[in-house]
Image (cartoon, rainbow, N blue to C red):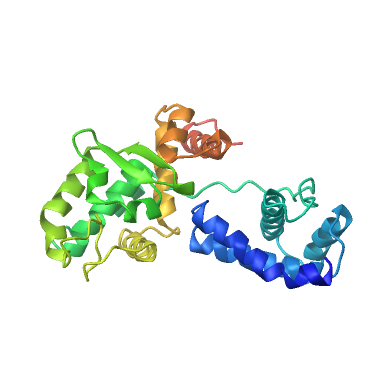
Amino acid sequence: MMAKEQSRASPLIARFTNYLTTERNYSGHTISNYRRDLTFLMSFLKTKKIDRSTARDYLQELENRHYSRRSIARKLSSARSFFRFLLREKLTAKNPFETLLTPKLPKKLPNFLYLEELNKLLSSPDEKSLAGSRDRAILELLYGSGVRVAEAIHLNQGDINFEEGELRVLGKGAKERIVLFGSEAKQALQKYLGSSRPKLSVNNHLAAVFLNLRGGRLTCRSVERMLTKYAKLAGITKKVTPHTLRHSFATHLLAGGADLRVVQELLGHVSLSTTQVYTHITKERLKEVYDAAHPRATR
């Protein structure tokens, strides 16, 4: 990258991250990762000419610095996306990272809870308290619908259709979708909205479903802390996050015979391959049950 181009690097990164925020609706955490990755990339490029050879040199530099495969894959993905944006905006003539092979990542199976663990977790909140009633409702909803935690905390009361058992949520990329929830989540939500939420509300104009103890909208971090607390109360030693409930939702549906494409639709996955990881989980569970229960299963 020539000196003149280098001086424009920071404004270009700002322009790109603004695009990710306004048009792609990416989270602040994701934006921070892109900004950090691209600042590192620009520092490497400096006065180098932008071509495939330089892209390969960048990969070699990442490997020399002993970054993990996952980190290298993310940094190359950031570079690829950035240059695609520059191409779209006619600010560059080529994307040297487009055909660069990304290191193959080992498959990491999502963490999920077994039904007995879930029952203990869901019964942990004290529903007699304001916070406990709210917490039971959000836990039941996360597991009962499979929504992302960000989708749950951004729910407004008008987004819930109790008669049809449906939620209207705004997912990744600002895409709206309808998801379903069952009777247990319905009961917990109605109890919370009917008794606890009015007492938590200090602003009658705030439409948010889930409120904190000061009457504001609940945050993702608050729900994460909540899960950690209730997992400990339930005696669950594995790490439990809001996404663990989403993974459990998908895993249990597939184990119960649900069609993969139905689960894809409920989760809001663009690609079926993203949903297919849960079929590996159910196979692992089958193996565990077989090994534990069959007298001739020892292998």
Q: Residue at x 41, y 44 (%)?
A: 248
Q: In this view, does 135 lie to the left or right of 145?
A: left
Q: Position of residue 91 (x, y in %)?
A: 73, 56
Residue at point 22%, 71% (across, down): 214
Image coords of residue 192 (percent x, y): 17, 54
The reply to whether residue 156 is in sight is yes
In the image, residue 216 lies at what x, y percent? 25, 66
User: Residue at (54%, 30%) from the top-left corner?
Assistant: 296
Visible residue check, residue 120: no
Vertical relation: 144 (above or below) 59? above
Number of residue marks? 0
Give 10 or 156, whichever is nearer the viewer: 10
Query: Residue 102, position in %: x, y?
Result: 75, 50
Q: In this view, does 269 lie to the left or right of 150?
A: right
Q: In this view, does 25 lie above or below 29?
A: above
Q: Which of 294 and 254 is in front in this view?
A: 254
Q: In which quarter of the image is the N terminus?
A: bottom right
Say above or below: 279 vs 127: above
